[in-house]
Image (cartoon, rainbow, N blue to C red):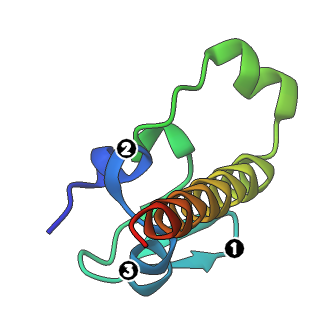
Amino acid sequence: MIKVKDVAKTMTLKDFQKRFTQENQGIKDNLTRKIYFCIYDFGFKVSQEDCLEVRDCKECMNEAIEYLKFRNNSRENKKYEQSSFDR
């Protein structure tokens, strides 16, 4: 099981969507039943200044999910490019 703090570094979007669901202002871990309100809990780097500027935890969570989507697409593109070279 991936530790919650390692989500930003290691978890794929597919795994994230299986394990976590949006719950009002936060994200619920379906394995532990805990609710997280800050992307800092998932290992994303957030400063206090960033937090005060945004003031909406849901907005940060959406940005984190968008980041996971972007990273997922980047990995898929690399796999495709690599398989093209292997031919």
**Residue at the image point whose x is 54% and y is 45% from the top:** 39
| Element type where label 1 sits in the image | loop
For label 3, the crowd category at 10 Å Cα-Cα, with few meaning under 14, some 14 to 19 and many 20 or more, is some
| Element type where label 2 sits in the image | helix
Q: At label 1, which amino acid type do we have?
A: Asn
Q: Are marks 2 and 3 in contact (CB under 8 Å)?
A: no
Position above or below: 50 against 83:
above
In the rendered structure, the answer to whether residue 11 lies left or right of residue 36 reads: left
Label 1: which residue?
24
Q: Where is residue 42 in the image (x, y as percent from the top left)?
A: 42, 47
Q: Nearer the viewer, residue 59 or 71?
A: 71
In the rendered structure, the answer to whether residue 9 lies left or right of residue 1 reads: right
Precedes in sequence: disc 1 or disc 2? 2
Label 2: which residue?
9
For label 1, the crowd category at 10 Å Cα-Cα, with few meaning under 14, some 14 to 19 and many 20 or more, is few
In the rendered structure, the answer to whether residue 30 lies left or right of residue 62 reads: left
Q: Position of residue 80 (x, y in %)?
A: 54, 69
Q: Which of 53 and 69 is in front in this view?
A: 69
**Residue at the image point whose x is 71% and y is 27% from the top:** 51
Q: Which of 52 and 16 is in front in this view?
A: 16
**Residue at the image point whose x is 74% and y is 50% from the top:** 63
Q: Distance between the residues labelled 1 and 2?
A: 25 Å
Q: In which quarter of the image is the N terminus?
A: bottom left
In this rendering, which labeled residue sits more in front, label 1 or label 3? 3
Label 3: which residue?
19
Q: At label 3, which amino acid type do we have?
A: Arg
| Element type where label 3 sits in the image | helix
